[in-house]
Image (cartoon, helix red, strand yellow):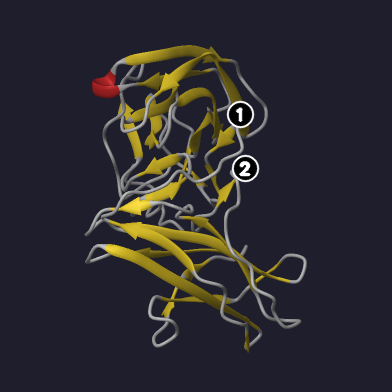
Amino acid sequence: MRRLSRWMAVLAAVSLVVSGASAAMASNAPWHVVYAPSVGASAEVGEPVLITGFSYVGEGTPAHGVELTFDDGVTWAEADINSNGSWRYLFTPVQSGDVVFRMRGWYNGELGDISPPRTFHVGTPSSLAPIYCPCTFRESELPHDDMDAVPVELGVRFAVDRPGSLNGVTFRRGTYRGPVTIRVWGPGGTLLHEHVEPAATTRYTSAAITPPVQAQPGIDYVVSYYTPEGGYQASEDFYTGTLFHAPYIVRADAGVYHYGEGGGFPTDTWHHSNYTIYPSFVS
């Protein structure tokens, strides 16, 4: 893990319901979509929350920058944005109540309009955001091939906000394209599912979990895959706060790993890393 290069991407989910606000912009002014937190999300006081989304101009030209305001435009904070228009901002609430934020972006020096408000709750009950399943939690990332060539199990730890089942995983392979073992773990490392996924020639693998694993809210699960020769992809500084991305709740240091022949329940973390594996959920 110590050979990982610094993360250069920001967070934006793919293949999940896009719940966000877009604003009418001038010809070269950006428009925005918020991916997380989902509508109705509720964080705890002092819990770092990842606000993520994307901002484009026209039919898909990435914005050059995005700012967020939490005081109706009195002050603005610049978000981290990458070359494909995906951005994120880490916000830590210090008191209970609703957090309301807006966005504005720019492109070639042209500042866009301020977006409609978006709200999430702090220290108060939440409501369930609408979802359209199957829901695959998958980030827009720019990972790199890790140099590790030893046996390792790589996964992501998460919870869900409603009852349902886990019916698959997707992951992005590195240089190793041989057979891998897919596993689903419950509390305390209870093994809930295991199967061998055959070799592949492409980076992306989508694997079904048959039969689906029942998932209950408020319980941590881990989906992982074991590679006997390393050869995976990863990025650092990724899971730096909580992602409320319905139906998933993915907290800081969600990327986990375990070295050793045959793999095992992954619990170790390294620099908030993401190992490019994501669950699929059906309600």
Residue 137 or residue 115, whichever sits in front: 115
Residue 183 lies in quadrant: top left
Please tell me whether residue 22 is drawn above or below residue 70 in the rendered image: above
Q: Mark 2 — residue?
A: 15
Residue 43 location (% of width, % of height): 31, 53
Residue type marked 2: Ser
Residue 269 location (% of width, % of height): 28, 40
Residue 231 location (% of width, % of height): 48, 33
Find numbered disc 2 in the image and state the secondary structure of the residue it sits on.
loop
Q: Residues within 10 Å of mark 1 (few under 14, many from 20)?
A: some
Q: Residues within 10 Å of mark 2 (few under 14, many from 20)?
A: some
Count every numbered label the image shows and give the total.
2
Residue 210 or residue 144, whichever sits in front: 210
Please tell me whether residue 116 is drawn above or below residue 170 in the rendered image: below
Find numbered disc 1 in the image and state the secondary structure of the residue it sits on.
strand
Q: Residue at x 56, y 36 (%)?
A: 136
Task: For residue 239, say whether it is visible.
Answer: no
Residue 186 lies in quadrant: top left
Residue 210 location (% of width, % of height): 55, 12
Residue type marked 1: Thr
Q: Mark 1 — residue?
A: 205
Inter-mark Cα distance, 2 to 1 = 15 Å
Q: Residue at x 44, y 30 (%)?
A: 230
